[in-house]
Amino acid sequence: MIGIKAISSYLPNETIDNLQQAKKFGQTEDFITDKIGALRLPVAKMEQQTSDLAVAAVEKLLEENELQRDQIDALVVVTQNPDGHGLPHTAAIVQHKLGLSSKVAAFDVSLGCSGYIYGLSIIKGVMEQADLKNGVLVTADPYSKIIDRNDRVTSLLFGDGSTATWLNESGQWKIGKPIFQTDGSGEKNLYVEGGYLHMNGRQVFNFAAMTVPKQINEWLVSNQLTAKDVDLFCLHQGSASIVDAISRRFPEVKNRFIKDIETTGNTVSSSIPFLLEKYVMNSQHRNILISGFGVGLSWATNMIHKEL
Amino acid sequence: MINANNIETALENIGSDTKLTQADYNKPFNEIGLDSLDVFNLFSELELVTGKVVSDDDFQTINTLQDIIDYLNK
């Protein structure tokens, strides 16, 4: 069965000092450190395309693992900020920039913060159906392209970054059966208009705080597990406050919820694989619950489980 | 019915260390040390207790803890 073999990531060197931004917006230092959680926001250079971020993460994956580029036969890019206008799809551009074989299956998935959970299931399904051997799931969604730096609601939250997840038959981290949910009535809570991102912060917060714990519980019940069976909860890092609001619903295991947003900000579909790379891949843990939620509204939960 | 005890419990649950006096219930949120995310959090907590969802239009009219109590008890 196909599983996750390794994860690598890329963060741009250039960063925005969020405490400086907070001053500009009349926010306190505590608001940034305790509530937003992000002290620095990595930001891609103007000339850096989404495909460049994707390539940087995959190059790192190739450097750090015994994976050759000619072995890659599936490439999925999760993004809602593709190169140009999304035509052609960014995955094709990445295939060319990386010099991958023309025999690679390559396509984009248009999802935001739930994208990694979907992406794992999609690439696994395609690989199994087409008998592909080495798949790479990329997340790269540079929101700096769509942030109005004068908008206090969005400007303090999002950072740029990218990740690359290698999947194959020998991957130790097996992927469970996900739960996906969608509520398009929330389309206006997080959307782009006039080239900029607009967010109804209260509605997005409330959606995450109210629906995600329910979905996590539903996932656990349907898999005959309890929260205590989960070694780590790696949730989308929307903000420190959102992670706190969700973990509060699981008081017995609150300390198993990872909160790590200080140097990345909210990196959309990349936040979960960033956590998996840092806290899970080389750990002794076995059961990792992953949950992504955001634009759509869309939310999804699954577990990755290490086979011994 | 929502009362001051419910508000204090909700604030405790969200980790707020705001110490309230009677007069604080009629002060704007920012004057009693509650920032925007505290207020979002507080509404989520109270939605769990009351099951009442506050619309965006109504949310704009709620500026104090007393406004919350009055609104949820309507």
Image (cartoon, coloured by chain):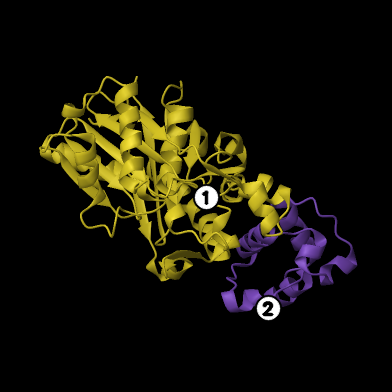
As drawn, A256 above or below A159: above
Q: Is disc 2 surrounded by few (<14), some (14 to 19) or many (20+) residues within 10 Å?
A: few
Q: Position of residue A144 (x, y in %)?
A: 46, 53
Q: Is residue A190 visible?
A: yes
Q: Position of residue B6 (x, y in %)?
A: 75, 62
Q: CA distance from mark 2 to mark 1?
A: 27 Å
Q: Position of residue A19 (x, y in %)?
A: 67, 47
* Number of numbered discs visible in the structure rendering: 2
**Is disc 2 placed on a helix, strand or loop?**
helix
On the image, which quarter does residue A100 sit in?
top left
Q: Which residue is mark 1?
A: A238
Q: Is residue A290 visible?
A: no
Q: Which residue is mark 2?
A: B61
Q: Determine the residue positioned at 24% across, 42% down.
A: A94
| Image chain in yellow | A
Q: Determine the residue positioned at 56% across, 34% down.
A: A256
- For the C terminus of chain A, the quadrant is top left
